[in-house]
């Protein structure tokens, strides 16, 4: 069971206290610098190849923020299963769910497989809605230097019929080169790129049958 953002941030103080009392915990993780650093999730993929043709659908992508430290401006790490803490001097520039949604819009728009694709809430109509929620987004530091872990759930909904077209969960990992926030952020971007690869392919494939059914 995931803990709340308030509970997760409370763990920061406990983690910091643990650094002073335990000689076996790396001082790099959690408090690796005295200067505030802000990171941004980046898509490391090369430019996608345009689709052969458009499916004619208009897609809206909607991030669904979660009340956990994983989907917050904090850069989360974990030393024990199902526990989270936050790097004291490192944050994200955007919530992971919001940033991943924007990167996915950019990916899909570049492919031109849809008639249009945009973020929900921009005043643009769409007949398909893709909800994106972040389940896991953290530096797994159970063993040093650790692993970046990302898990995202997606729901594709046909707005004209209000029916669920498809639902799937995507998970990816990437090794962290060093036990610090900068390396963790880089690896979380790497894992995110893998998620975006799968998500973009999945939504394009699931939307195509819906387009055919609507044409009939």
Image: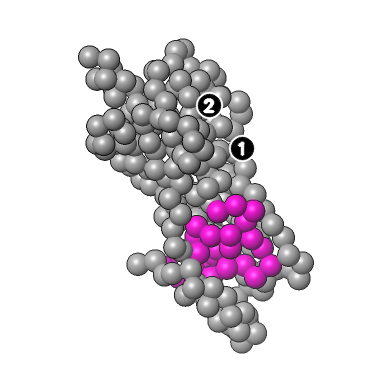
Check if residue 93 falls in the magenta segment.
Answer: yes
Residue 111 image position (x, y, % from top left): 52, 22
Residue 77 image position (x, y, % from top left): 54, 65
At 54% from the left and 31% from the top, the residue drawn is: 107
Q: Against 17, is 52 above or below?
A: above
Q: Against 6, is 63 above or below?
A: above
What is the C-alpha distance between the residues marked 2 and 1? 16 Å
Find disc 1 in the rendering and name its residue: 44
Residues drawn in magenta: 69-95
* Mark 1: secondary structure: loop
In front here: 142 or 122?
122
- The quadrant in which the C terminus is found is top left
Q: Which residue is most to the right?
A: 35
Q: Which residue is most to the front?
A: 123
Which of the 4 image quadrants contains residue 145?
A: bottom right
At 46% from the left and 12% from the top, the residue drawn is: 52
Residue 191 image position (x, y, % from top left): 53, 46
In front here: 206 or 58?
58
In front here: 29 or 54?
54
Q: Disc 2, disc 1: CB below 8 Å?
A: no
In front here: 162 or 169?
162
- The quadrant in which the N terminus is found is bottom left
Residue 92 image position (x, y, % from top left): 62, 56
Find disc 2 in the rendering and name its residue: 109
Asked if residue 79 shows in the view, the reply is: no
**Can you tell which mark lies on residue 88?**
none
């Amino acid at each position: 069971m995931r803990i709340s953002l308030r509970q997760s941030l409370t763990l920061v103080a406990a983690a910091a206290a643990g650094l002073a009392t335990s000689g076996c915990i790396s001082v790099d993780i959690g408090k690796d610098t005295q200067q505030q650093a802000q990171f941004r999730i980046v898509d490391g993929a090369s430019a996608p190849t345009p689709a052969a043709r458009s499916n004619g659908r208009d897609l809206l992508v909607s991030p669904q923020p979660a009340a956990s430290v994983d989907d917050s401006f904090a850069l989360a790490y974990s030393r024990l299963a199902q526990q989270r803490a936050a790097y004291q001097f490192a944050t994200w520039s955007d919530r992971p769910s919001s940033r991943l949604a924007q990167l996915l819009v950019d990916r899909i728009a570049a492919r031109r497989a849809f008639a249009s694709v945009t973020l929900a809430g921009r005043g643009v109509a769409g007949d398909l809605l893709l909800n994106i929620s972040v389940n896991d987004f953290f530096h797994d530091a159970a063993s040093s230097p650790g692993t970046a872990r990302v898990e995202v759930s997606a729901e594709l909904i046909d707005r004209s019929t209000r029916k669920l077209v498809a639902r799937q969960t995507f998970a990816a990992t990437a090794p962290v080169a060093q036990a610090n926030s900068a390396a963790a952020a880089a690896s979380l971007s790497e894992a995110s790129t893998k998620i975006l690869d799968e998500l973009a392919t999945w939504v394009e494939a699931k939307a195509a049958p819906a387009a055919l059914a609507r044409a009939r």
